[in-house]
Amino acid sequence: MIVVVDERELVTEGFKSLFGREGVPSASFEPREFQAWVHTAADTDLDAVEAFLIGKSNSTFELPRAIRSRSAAPVIAVNDTHSLEATLALYDSGVDDVVRNPVHPREILARAAAIRRRLKSMVNHTDIGSIRVFSDGRDPEIEGETFALPRRERRILEYLVANRGKRVTKGQIFNAIYGIFDEDVEENVVESHISKLRKKLRKKLGVDPIDSKRFLGYRIDWD
């Protein structure tokens, strides 16, 4: 999920629409509301955030510090001006990257993914058994062959792999895939997506690498 912060509702709603077209959930805040939320949000909600996008605000230079106190997700600032001084000031405030409007949402997603790779000092894929899962939006591979999945199932597999060895709840998966503020989708839809994903993996691999425990959640850990 991408969190967009800007004092202009037209801007936040515009970004929400653009990210939605890319199949990426997002949430928008006006700056004061965001500061209250980032200090009080549950850790599981913050863990669902893939990146923070900061736009125009009287508190723009205060927001990165507030975010860093709770989250390590990339912080990207949108600079509406072409001023070098403004760009340098944004970097000094603690943002990870600065982009200029207009900017395509795919560029923002690519920059966020690049920042996460640098922060984690890891390659852009993770191998679990014969499964190779990428962090750049590509379909996974099994024994070197592309294993095409619908977007939601792919993102669930990516999330499980990112939390390899840890048990994650249905709620955590839902927040990561649909966004914590999506009230139009029932949380139980996660069970349907995971059921379909497990059937496809079992058919391809001969085994089910996803372990589930009632009330405890799901875990993938397969050698």
Image (cartoon, helix red, strand yellow):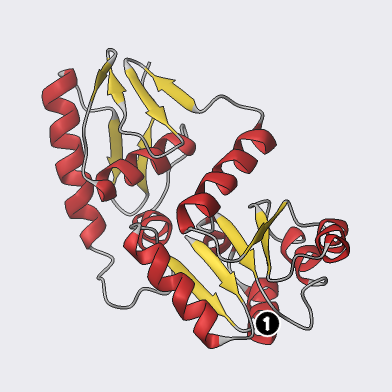
Q: Position of residue 211 (x, y in %)?
A: 30, 35
Identify which residue is drawn at 58% across, 48% down: 112
Q: Position of residue 150 (x, y in %)?
A: 21, 45
- Image side of residue 84 versus residue 186, left or right: right
User: Helix, strand, or loop for circle 1?
Assistant: helix
Q: Quadrant of the C terminus?
A: top left
Is residue 154 in view?
yes
Residue 136 position (above or below residue 169): above
Identify which residue is drawn at 68% across, 82% down: 31
Q: Where is residue 35, by image quadrant?
A: bottom right
Residue 124 position (above or below residue 66): above
Of 77 and 24, nearer the camera is 77
Reading the image, the residue beneath label 1 is 31
Q: Where is residue 161, by image quadrant?
A: top left
**Label 1 sits on what residue type?**
Pro
Of 138 and 194, nearer the camera is 138
- Image side of residue 21 versus residue 202, left or right: right
Of 22 and 37, nearer the camera is 22
Q: Position of residue 206 (x, y in %)?
A: 15, 18
Dot 1 surroundings within 10 Å: few (below 14), some, or many (20 or more)?
many
